[in-house]
Structures are given as structure tokens and as C-alpha cells.
Amino acid sequence: TDNTANTVRSAVRDLRGSLIRSFDAEISDIDGIIKLTLGEPDFPTPERITQAGIESIKAGHTHYAPNAGTMGLREAVVGYLKRRRQLNYTVDNIVATVGGSEALSSSLGALLSEETQSIIPIPAFGAYKTQTLLAGGTVDLIDTTDTGFKLTPEQLEAAIDRAHQAGKHPILIINYPNNPTGVALTSEEIQALADIVRARDIIVVSDEVYSEIYYGEGRADSIARYVPENTVLIDSASKAFAMTGWRVGYIAAPVELAQEFVKVHQSNVATGATFTMDAAQEGYEHGDSDIEHMVAQYSNRRNFMYNELVDMGLNVAYPDGAFYLFIQIPQWFDGTSLEFCTKLAYEAKVALIPGAAFGDPQSRWVRASYAASMENLRESAARIRTWLEENA
Ligand code: PLP
């Protein structure tokens, strides 16, 4: 209507709904379809966490918490970051948020403006670009397909130069382990990026919501270990503790920044839900074994599915973390990633996510989630194999 056209900002009108959600809605009705589309753990929330949530409600923790979150959760996050990630923060660095999503929107809401150019390695989670466009800023999408889905120091240097040449203020937004590729960076690779971040004095927003779902040695490393003064760390209980519906996340940032983020957070949501913060606190304090239990199963599924797909002759990015496999569309297929996924969904009855959902409309890749039972993974592997044999 005219009213919409006149009153809703063009930046909002121009936003396209999530391709993931619209595709998922379309194929969900297909009889017998197996969906490897989900971006969330298929495990129930660990019992101790659920219990802590129930007890919190019963204890009457059903009123407003402090704006930055309950002191209990913030202290638990500080302890967790030290214990599991070798990161040194105090409660003044931590803002508890409504999931990683609001950690992104409140931090980026404070950092981004018309003068910002966000440097975003793609493929990437859609919110980075969306938040930038909403703030009136511009994006510089760096295609990392040819560099093993890793942002290289050279690419970063060049992007910072481009932003300055355009009279823009660069900000880097990274996500390793990555959605949709599962690729993580080594400590050396992280340090090489950190050196540039330090030398060029830019802010890096590091989305580490998949840091716990990591199959390498020890823990996934963080750029916050090398340039804490420049890093805005985004994390969430959603993936680590299978708590997507509880909506708890946090930002860890230098105090001066955290204070500004709280203002945006306060104005957006006031504070998170008190009893879900209590539940997440239990996870950050005592949930290490729950994480390890889930990661062991993800790891088995990853090995199974990766080996199957490679055995079918497919090219798959080797995943170090998260619960995704990024698969190259075979050469013989002539069409978009959406057309490929649609055909596969109707003919093989396996649903994957088109790579176009992650920043490049021309993507020749698709994402499979293995946050699914072994039984469903076995069956989908068999279906894809048969379909490939019939079509290639
Ligand atoms: N960042 C990445 C890379 C994600 O994949 C997701 C969810 O899919 C989020 C952030 C946000 O998750 P939540 O808001 O549930 O913490």
C-alpha cells in the first residue's frame, strides 16, 4: 500500500525474506522427504539445563533481570570463557542477549552506520549483510570459494584498502567454524588476520556460535585471544547446549564497547528472559560433559556423511566444525543452486539448502546439515547415491 511505501524505510522494504525459510516451507510438504536443512541441533536440551530452567521459574525468577543480564549468567560466562576458550574477560565485558542473533543486532546496531563498509567473507550467515544494510552501510562480500573457504590476509588487506578508498569505515565480520561450510581457521591463520586487524586498527566482529562444535585438537581458537581490544565476540547457548528455543546468547567486548552495546540492547529488548538465563548459566557452569557427548555424535555423523558424499564422487569442503557439509553441485547439472535443491527434493526426496542463501546468487554449492539421526543420514546418503547414478 501507499502507506507501506511511504512509512517503511527503503532499506527494510528491499530486504528479502530468508531463502532458507521459504525453500524449507516449499519442500516440507513433499511426501516422505528427509530434511537435512535444519540449522539447529536435533538433540534435546540437556536435562540439567532444563531442570535449572524449571527450578528458576518455580523460585519466582520471572521478573526483569538487570539490563546486561543476570550477574549469575555473566559470571558463569566469564568462567566458561577462561576454562574452555583461554579467554580473559570480566563481567563488565559481558552483555547477555536474546540469542546470538540479538548479540549481532545490538553490537552491529551500535557499530554500523552509513559510513561503514562491512567486510564479509562469503558464503556467510545472512544476518551480517542484513544488519549492515539496515544501518545504511555498504557490504564488501569476499568470495572465499577459491581459498578453501577461508579469508586470507591478502583478501583482508585489499578489502580494508577498498573501504578507505571509498571513504568508508571498514569493519570485519567473520564466522569460524563457519555456517554453511563447517570450515574453521587454524591458530596460525587466525593470528595472521589478527596481525592485520591490529596494524590497521579495525574492529572485528567474530561470530563464534559454533566454537564448541569443533573436531580439531583441543578447542577452536578465537581472534579475541590475539586482539581483544579490537574484538567483539558473539556467542550463543543455542548450538553449544542445544538451546535454540531458549534464546540466550552474549557479547564479550572491551568495556567501552560493551557499555555502548548495552544501550542498544536495553532499547531493543530491555533484557533477556530471566529463567532462560538461569538455565544457560547451568550449562556454562556444568555443561562441559553435555557438549562433549553431543560433539562425539556430531563427529560420527560428520565422518559417515563426508565419506559417503566423497565416495559418490562429490566435492565436499572438509568440515572442522559446526554441523554442516558444503557440497559442490556436479558439473553436469545446468541450473541454479535453488533449481538443484528443488530437483533433488522432488526426485530424491532429500532436502538440502541452496548455496545462494549464503551471499552468492551464482553459488554452485549446497549445504547439508547433519544435525539429523544416523538413520536419516544413512537413508539420505542412499537416496542421493541412487539419484546421482540415474542422473549423472
Ligand atoms: N550466527 C550463526 C553463524 C548462525 O548460524 C546462527 C543461527 O543459525 C546464529 C548466529 C544465531 O543463532 P541464535 O540466535 O539462535 O543464537
Image: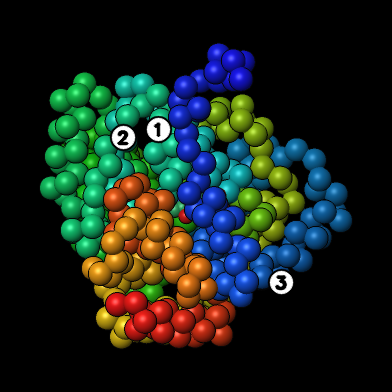
What's the residue type where badge 1 is placed? Thr
Quadrant where the image shows the C terminus: bottom left
In the figure, residue 59 lies in which quadrant?
bottom right
Q: CA distance from mark 3 to mark 2?
A: 42 Å
What's the residue type where badge 3 is placed? Glu
Q: In this orientation, which residue lies closer to the viewer: 150 or 355?
A: 355
**Disc 2 target residue:** 139
What's the residue type where badge 2 is placed? Val
**Disc 1 target residue:** 132
Q: Is mark 1 within 8 Å of ligand 1?
A: no
Which residue is drawn at the image coordinates 33% and 47% (left, top)? 361
User: Secondary structure under badge 3?
Assistant: helix
Q: In this orientation, which residue lies closer to the viewer: 283 or 358?
A: 358
User: Secondary structure under badge 2?
Assistant: strand
Q: CA distance from mark 1 to mark 2?
A: 7 Å
Q: State yes or no: discs 1 and 2 in contact (Cβ < 8 Å).
A: yes
User: Earlier along the polypeptide chain: callout 1 or callout 2?
Assistant: 1
User: Earlier along the polypeptide chain: callout 1 or callout 3?
Assistant: 3
Query: Which labelled disc corresponds to residue 47?
Result: 3
Residue 128: x percent and y percent? 41, 41
User: Secondary structure under badge 1?
Assistant: helix
Which residue is drawn at the image coordinates 17% and 32% (left, top)? 162
Would you say residue 377 is visible in this rendering? yes
Horizontally, residue 302 falls left or right of residue 27, namely left
Q: How is the image coloured?
A: rainbow
Which residue is drawn at the image coordinates 57% and 72% (left, top)? 33
Residue density around tag 2, few if under 14, some if 14–19, many if 20 or more, within 10 Å: some
Which mark is nearer the camera, 1 or 3? 1
